[in-house]
Image (cartoon, rainbow, N blue to C red):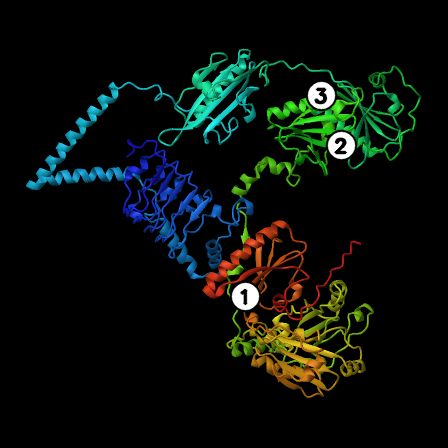
Amino acid sequence: MSNSWPQLEVLDVSENKLEQLPAALCKLASLRKLYISDNRLSFAGMPKSIGKLERLVVLNAANNLLENIPEGLCRCGQLRRLYLSNNRLVTLPDAIHYLKETLDVFDVANNPDLVLPPKPKEIQIGAGKAFYNLDFSLETHKKAALLRSGSPLAGEQATQAAAAAAAPGHAKRDQAARWRRLKRRGRDSGSESGAGASGDDTSSRKVLDGMRKVARAKQTQQFEAQSVKSRSWKDSLRKPDLDYSEIFDELVGQIPGLEVWEIDDRYPQPVEKDLIGVFFRGDCYVVLNTFQAQNGSLDWAIYYWIGSSATTDKLFCASMHAVNLRNLLGAECRTQREEEDGESPEFLALFGGSIQIVDGEHSNSGLFQVIEEQPPCRLYRLCGAQTVRLQAVSLSPDELDPKFVYLLDAQTMLFVWVGASAKHMTASKARLIADRIRKNERKNAAEVVSTMEGFEPVEFWTALGCEKPAREEAVDHIPADWEPSRPLLYAVRMGPGTLEIPRIRGQLTQSVLESTGVYLLDCGTDIFVWFGGKAVKFLRYAGLKLAQEAFTLFDRSPETTAVTRCLESAEPIAFKLRFHGWDDAVAVDFTRTAESVAKRGTDMRTIMERDKMRMDLTDFFLPRPTPPTAEEFADQMANFRDDVDNLETLANFVLVPNYRAIKSAEKYKRIAPDELGHFYSKECYIFICHYYPEEPEEDPEQPKDEEEEEEEIQMKYIVYFWQGRDTSELALHKFNFDTRKTLAEKIKDPEFRPMRQQEESREFLALLNRKFIVHKGPRPRTPQDLEKWRAAEVTRLYQLRTPNADPMLSRCLEVPAAAASLCSAFCHLLTRGPDRLLVWRGRGSSQTDRELALELATSLLPDATPAEMTEGEETDEFWELLGGRAAYFTGVDFYSACRLFKITTEEGYLKADDLGVDFAQSALTDSAIMLLDTGVKLYLWIGTKVSDVLKKLALQAAKLYLLAVRDREGASGTRRLGAAQKGSEPPDFTVCFHAWGEHKAVKDWRG
């Protein structure tokens, strides 16, 4: 097959019921398209060495019986379209992910059992250099979580991974060992046949010996035939390993037709289609004719034409680039030399039988001497402080004005003249401009001189064309609001048979200039002609002609206007200053020290690959805490209250009614026992709790000492400081720096435990015995004020929540008195005046919460009888007190699944902290990103002071959490990812927080 079709590029064997492809198919080195669809091919029927088809671009294997594809197919680097639909695919090689990076079409539809292998770490989304080499793969973090939790599964998984790595399928093939086994097998078979071979074995051995002799004879005849046959000159040619992408376009020779290049400055430049057939006597050309051969493939004919007046460098470059073109195309034809007036008939036939020869030359020679013209002296007037603008003026001392700064360019001398009333910022920037001209344009061959008005050197006046100053001091004759004329930019373009010069509107920036174009910049006293590096020759020629006619075109005087040619990447400073934001400053990383650069190098890519970035996301894999049972709750309450029950109930708790009492040095006041458990959001409280110390275990054999029995018991004191949500942050500072010192003097060795609203510890809540009510606003000062507060005709609504069904965490907080504050998952208490008390039980509330709601209702209004009602059975009075019916959140399953995580880099690495199920709105900080799982949706709450790096990493962490939940919960662990913006959170986000309100603004004390 390979000998018959050495140049075969397209093979179509579709719809033939083939069950196997021949191995010789892989020898078709020129094959580009292979169609094998609608057959009966399986994995065993595919040749294993299909990876040898290096030029394969299209493979259509749809509608077959393939279970997999050979791994060698993933090594076909030029493959762009792969069709594998309607097969029996189960999996694909691991290298398929690398192949997918370059594929334009990857069709694996209708393969229901297909499971793609996991992506390698280096090409996973959310990994690699773009994410600081952090590994966000599920298996890595799952293993880290198992190791952290101390689970025995971690050791088992590590052992299984080590065993899998040591399996034969994962080990590299030892070719030498395989060769030794084959030789040993041959010796063993030979010894067995000599010891006791039968007649059949002897005959078989004779047949094998005869076949070996025939093969040796055939090989000898082929070697003699090859040695006698003479080698062609084409066989000795070897394509050089050169890159021609910068010389010729990648589509050269791919479309039938005629293409012509002219040698311009030692490189071929494409000739416009309208000028094909026109040759200049002073130029050389390369001609390519692409045509279709009889077998249907493309073939080429290459010529190079030499003009009679062409220089030697053009002749040499034409022949050289003709050979380069042949190597690029892989053509077997030879390059044909064509000289002026001696063209071959085949060459003339390409142009209709004749060509047009024009005197002169159209391109530039690569070997010429640069005659540097001495440009005239120029005087520029500068203005502006933030952005310096300049304008060329006539070379005369009369142009000097004391309000401005001037730059006198005398080629070898650069003078910066500063007027007496000029701005210092403009003078400083003028000096920087002069330094850049000296360094970039004069190659450090000029001298910069700064001079003030009245202290000019003699060379300055000489450059201005006068021997001495025309006057003693400059005259103020230029208006103070003078500004240079606005530069106008024009593009030189080819229109339909005409040359167009449209004006470029808008702000002039460097991005406006395209490398393929030619532009004219009119600055009033300066006209610049800018040539792009990839501009065609005709546009350049047109630009030069327009520059010569610029005085007529723009109505300028040759005595006051200068025309300057500018090449891309070599523009003068006077040209760059006309464009906004054109800065040649080199970017410097000021975040790294010299020691760091010397030790670790400058390549950040290498540093990131070498360093192992740390992160901790193991909290994502920890299960949600399970609710405690009734026995566990009773044991916890007993443990927390045992040492307090010996006191006089809870009378030893001391409460500061208002934090202002501390400021005014008022005496602490005890609260009434019936008020214990009631808090106000605009108040701060101090609790002093007395504990008996833990008694050491007694030794029954050791006799007791009477002195020890009479020794006074040392009490343990814990001071709790509770801060309401609506209080100022100064309250905590006052407690830390003032009140603590006072209490430490009165109490022996106290332990201080400050806390905020809804961040109370379990030990503190246990002391209140599930009586925890928070009212909005300040606390009434006197018992009379408290009675007035209760008797006021004001509607108040309280919401009772028990996070994670843990009775110890029950809290009852006041929420806005509106129907929208209701939630079907909780119980609510509604009060108005001293005798109206209603208890609303949501359909998702627990029986424990309903019983607790009745107890708290009695504590709110002791003299009122609570009226109970279940959701859906509300009275008109209930809705009237809430201001009318309104929509509210009716979901009940979210509270048993919600979790909150805090993602930060405060510790120097990416970390996710599980805030558990008992969290508050105050946990949402501006310097972190919060991850809220509602059981249905996963929200990313982004703080206002979070960096872009943390945002990018948090998004990948959220995707990892979704994988972790799906891996832990199965099909029921599906979540939708969303974002919540501060100040506009959706209802299913805010309902997860108890008593959600407006975000508390932190005062900026910096002024």
Earlier in the chain: of badge 1 and badge 2, it is 2
C-alpha gap between disc 1 and disc 3: 73 Å
Q: Is residue 81 above or below residue 749?
A: above
Residue at the disc numbered 1: 936
Q: Is residue 389 above or below residue 869?
A: above
Which one is in front, 548 or 130? 548
Residue at the disc numbered 2: 487
Residue 217 % position (x, y): 17, 26
Residue 625 % position (x, y): 53, 68
Quadrant of residue 70 within the rendered picture? top left
Secondary element under disc 3, as helix, strand or loop, is: helix
Residue 416 % position (x, y): 81, 25
Left or right of residue 646, residue 632 in this image: left
* Amino acid type of the residue that numbered disc 2 sits on in the rendered structure: Pro
C-alpha gap between disc 3 and disc 2: 19 Å
Which one is in front, 260 or 1006? 260
Taking the view exactly as shown, the residue that stands out farthest to the right is 472
Q: Is residue 357 above or below residue 592?
A: above
Closer mark to the observer between disc 1 and disc 2: 2
Label 1 environment density (alpha carbons within 10 Å; few <14, some 14–19, many ≥20): some
Please name the residue shown 80% across and 28% down the image. Answer: 391
Quadrant of residue 914 within the rendered picture? bottom right
Please name the residue shown 60% across and 35% down the image. Answer: 598
Left or right of residue 807, residue 665 in this image: right
Residue at the disc numbered 3: 548
Name the image quarter holding the N terminus: top left
Which circle marks residue 681 in the picture? none
Name the image quarter holding the C terminus: bottom right
Secondary element under disc 1, as helix, strand or loop, is: loop
Earlier in the chain: of badge 1 and badge 3, it is 3
